[in-house]
Image (cartoon, helix red, strand yellow):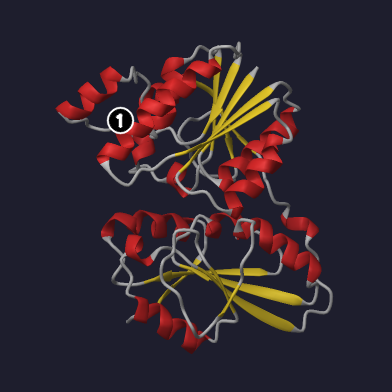
Amino acid sequence: MNLIICLTPLQMLIAETIIKKKQLKNNILVVIAYNDNDKFRYYYNRLSSLCNASYFFLIDNSSLFNRIKAMARLKLFVSLLSKYDFSSCYLASIDCSYIQLITSSIEYQELYTFDDGTINLLADSSYYRDKSYSLFEKVFRRIFGIKDTVSLYRKNSIFHYTIFKNNSNIIENTEFIPFIQPNVIQSYNVDKVVKIFVGQPLSEIKVDKNTVISFLKDEKIDYYYPHPREKDFFDNVEYIYSNRIFEDYLVEYLECNVSADINVYTFFSTVVMNIKDLNRVNVISLFSSQVPDSFIGVYRLFRENNIEIRTIDE
């Protein structure tokens, strides 16, 4: 049996690609979700169709008490997995304590990893070092039997599947697995440019709402594709609501609108790296002086990959 563990819709789409490419049979899916929405359910249902059994575990990570309660529930849930004989485990979020609890509590022979996002490409991210745990966290991990760590995953991973071509990753032994095909989207007498803004939670990236409002107006953005965790709403632009992640939606849009080129604007979403090679798509990463220094590494990565970066609040 193969154990597939995912945290996000993108991870589920990548896992689906791996299963199809490797023709994996006898799969068990575990999704650890911090949100329960249409996107999660859409990709969960898609991936579940390739699995013998699927489990959707919703986590309330809003407080320490809720996190401890979730860990206790997850520990009980893992006992259900003991009935399976796992030969392989596939996972992406190597710094996630919930995943570390699962893999520390089951037996399997081989470990394979795959991409979570641009965090895989940033050498100063949490995917390249073990966390320094407080005394409480050490006791907490001991109580729940959490032994696996970032460094153990990187050491034990036999193979890493990546959606990012020609970029260093968490281990050297990688295989490129494109989940979207840039060459199948052809153009036919392009006569218009459509501008789409891909949102990110402003409270997390520390960008003022008025800065975005001004940009949407000045650039005459046609459509806004919101992030699931966004709380801000903008009145001066038409929203796109879809149960697909943006990359998936964009491919379908291009196929249905063959006479349109697309300008995609965002701050530093993983979307940038995923769609940069698509035909008829121009990607612009936006920079603001309000963005914390902790995110500067992402812009450095974008520059290395020849992605246009535009400062919007000079």
Q: In the rendered image, which quarter is residue 231 located in?
A: bottom left
Residue 199 can be seen in this image: yes
Viewer-proximal residue, 264 or 12? Answer: 12
> Mark 1 is on which residue type?
Asp
SS under mark 1:
loop
Going by the image, does 285 lie left or right of 225?
A: left
- Residue 194: give x, y in percent of width and height: 66, 79
- Residue 124: give x, y in percent of width and height: 33, 43
Q: Is residue 165 above or below residue 313?
A: above
The residue pinned by badge 1 equals 130
Q: Is residue 230 above or below residue 153?
A: below
- Residue 163: give x, y in percent of width and height: 60, 44
> Residue at horizontal 63%, vertical 42%?
44
> Residue at horizontal 61%, vertical 41%?
12
Going by the image, does 159 lie left or right of 185?
A: left
Viewer-proximal residue, 302 or 46? Answer: 46
Residue sitting farthest toward the right:
188
Viewer-proximal residue, 58 or 201? Answer: 58
- Residue 130: give x, y in percent of width and height: 30, 30
> Residue at horizontal 77%, vertical 57%?
183
Q: Is residue 151 above or below residue 211?
A: above
Q: Give the quadrant of the C terminus.
A: bottom left
